[in-house]
């Protein structure tokens, strides 16, 4: 695995054009325990999460794991020393479908990891898009079906998407906190601050300052393929 000068890297990449209607992004985490140190928060997210994870004593060595959206920030209890790869999806597959997906090879460069994830996404996307359109139903039935399918109620899901949009804006844009709150549909900056405290365990100002300080990683030292470098939209490294 190529890792350049640093020991840890977290990177999010845009999916291929054919997958964008169903997938939000691919992600790769290679860590020696620095980025996932105990006490750091795992942020809330509106997306389902699928991971292929290997621990030293696992049999079979590569296993798929699936989790529902995370409604609030949770402090990490232990650090990770290893690698996690996967993607976040707009729709959730049935957990029962995961055993049908074969393990992917993630040895070698990060370029090879992304190509493996693209191949996995190509296999999974038809399953995600295969659900029939929902017929006209009552609001109560719609809420129940939405919760059963997505893992959150419609309002909670919408709120997490608003939080995530603000999260990305603050990490990538020099816009003020007030402008970000207005652009993302918050009643005011204080409502956005309360949302960040609940979903990220920190204030939007501290998050923005930390993200901009950490996001100076050299994409070129992790990805040799120019097409892959153009797909990177979040990178944190040490």
Image: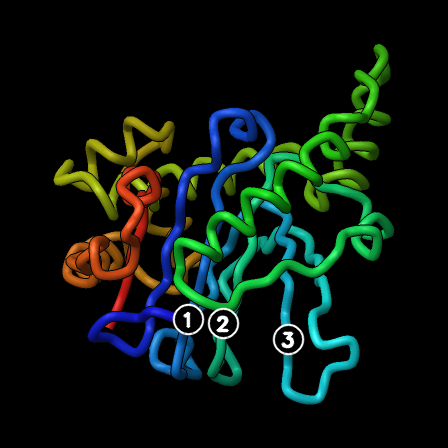
> Compared with residue 54, is residue 115 higher up or lower down, i.e. above or below?
above
Quarter containing the C terminus: bottom left
User: Circle 1: is it few (<14), some (14-19), or many (20+) Cα within 10 Å?
Assistant: many
Residue position for label 3: 54
**Residue at x 60% of width, y 35% of height:** 90
**Residue at x 58% of width, y 53% of height:** 71
Question: What's the distance in space between the residues labelled 3 and 2, CA to CA?
Answer: 8 Å
Question: What's the distance in space between the residues labelled 3 and 1, CA to CA?
Answer: 13 Å
- Nearer-the-camera pick, 170 or 104: 104
Number of the label disc, if any, that sits on residue 107: none
Residue 86 visible in the picture: yes
Residue position for label 1: 30
User: Circle 3: is it few (<14), some (14-19), or many (20+) Cα within 10 Å?
Assistant: some
- Is 116 situated left or right of 177 in this image? right
The mark that comes first in sequence, 3 or 2, is 3
The mark that comes first in sequence, 1 or 2, is 1
Question: What's the distance in space between the residues labelled 1 and 2, CA to CA?
Answer: 4 Å
Q: Is there CB contact under 8 Å for labels 1 and 2?
A: yes
| Image coords of residue 66 (percent x, y) | 71, 57
Residue position for label 2: 83
The mark that comes first in sequence, 3 or 1, is 1
| Image coords of residue 196 (percent x, y) | 38, 53
Element at badge 3? loop
Residue 156 visible in the picture: no
Quarter containing the N terminus: bottom left
- Is 102 situated left or right of 49 in this image? right
């Amino acid at each position: 695995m190529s890792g350049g000068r640093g020991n840890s890297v977290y990177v999010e990449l845009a999916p291929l054009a054919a997958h964008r209607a169903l997938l939000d992004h691919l992600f790769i985490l290679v860590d020696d325990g620095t980025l996932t140190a105990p006490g750091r928060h795992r942020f809330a997210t509106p997306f389902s999460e699928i991971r292929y994870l290997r621990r030293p004593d696992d049999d079979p060595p590569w296993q798929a794991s699936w989790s529902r959206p995370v409604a609030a920030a949770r402090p990490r209890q232990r650090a990770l020393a290893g690698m996690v790869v996967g993607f976040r999806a707009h729709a959730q597959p049935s957990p029962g479908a995961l055993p049908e997906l074969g393990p992917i090879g993630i040895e070698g460069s990060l370029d090879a990891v992304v190509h493996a994830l693209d191949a996995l996404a190509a296999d999974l996307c038809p399953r995600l898009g295969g659900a029939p359109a929902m017929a006209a139903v009552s609001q109560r039935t719609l809420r129940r079906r939405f919760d059963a399918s997505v893992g959150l109620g419609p309002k909670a899901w919408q709120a997490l998407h608003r939080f995530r949009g603000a999260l990305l804006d603050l990490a990538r844009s020099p816009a003020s906190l007030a402008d970000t709150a207005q652009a993302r549909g918050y009643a005011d900056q204080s409502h956005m601050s309360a949302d960040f405290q609940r979903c990220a365990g920190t204030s939007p100002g501290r998050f923005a300052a930390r993200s901009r300080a950490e996001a100076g990683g050299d994409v070129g030292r992790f990805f040799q393929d120019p097409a892959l470098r153009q797909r990177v939209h979040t990178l944190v490294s040490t």
